Amino acid sequence: MKKYLSLLFTISIPFILFSQDIVSKSKWLIEKIVVDGISSEWEKPFDFYNSNARVMFALANDSNYLYICILNTEKANQIRILNGGMKISLITKGKKKNTASISFPMGGNKMEHNNMPSGKRPDKMMMRNIFLKNNTSMKTSGFYSDNGIIPINNISGLKAAIDWDTNNYLVYEIAIPFFQIFGLGYSGNDLLKEFTLQVEIFPLGMSDKQGAGGNDKSGKKNEEGMQNEDGIRSEGGADHSMRSEGNRQGNTRNGGMNQHEGQNHQQSNEDRSYIFEKSKFKQTFFLSFPS
């Protein structure tokens, strides 16, 4: 009987760790986070990992801002994020349900390099710098002010940044002031409400109007172009042999996944067909405050 109970307990653990119904808490910040695409201020390992979206993420807040950091270790998934785009939504419930979102990158990143010598590929740093230079705007919706296409660093307080760390992991950070969620007259009771984070990663091959940033309803996909090793789109033909349809919801594990685990996950997974699919997941949480 003891062996049976032990086995039952062991089997049940993964379902608890990966359940998306678990309501978590963001971490209270003592020092302010600089939104610059560098994750050095964030405590490791990250609190959450979503299996099908293949990203680690963390949530934090101070008295004025909510911060979100998403870390991606896989080159194939970086390709999907940089070219298809990503949309982060915050859903709050009060007298009425409110959804505010940030689309960044907005997708459709295609970079020509006709000025390069024939047969020569641009190096990693050059492609990354071109991407960062060309992606300085985000699309916002549902916030108190400054909705539409706005700079990723602006006076409204909404900020976003993306960059690569020394391990070549893609780091995504955003900061959202609470007044942009609840309005200028928000109260402490508003901050006690339940939040839902929703993350959508769009498929490789979507144009900028069809991915995270746009509203093109035609359903046609831009299937021209291929990426270098960092996921930046360049001239050439795409390989569609891996394409499959679907919207992956994924499982979110509460408790984190360290960077070495993510790297091993990348090395052990040879099926990259997921980059032609949309991934979407949600995480419910409450804010934290000093005791």
Image: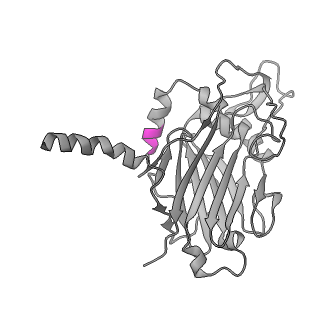
- Up the image or down, 64 lies above or below 117; here it is below
- Most extreme residue toward the right is 115
Whether residue 41 is visible here, answered yes or no, is: no
Image: 73 above or below 161: above
Asked whether 11 or 120 is in front, the reply is 11
In this view of the protein, can residue 44 be seen by the observer? yes
State the predominant SS element of the stretch in magenta.
helix
Q: Quadrant of residue 202?
A: top right
Residue 85: horizontal and vertical position, in percent?
71, 42
Tell me how many marks there are: 0
What's the magenta region?
258-262
**Residue 4, x across and y down, in percent:** 18, 40
Residue appearing at x 62%, y 49% in the figure = 199
Q: Is residue 276 above or below residue 73?
A: above
- Between 135 and 195, the one lying in front of the other is 195
Q: Position of residue 17 (x, y in %)?
A: 39, 48
Q: Quadrant of the C terminus?
A: bottom left
The reply, left or right, for residue 141 in relation to residue 7 is: right
The residue sitting at the left extreme is 1
**Residue 224 picture quarter:** top right
Residue 251 placement (x, y as % from top left): 49, 43
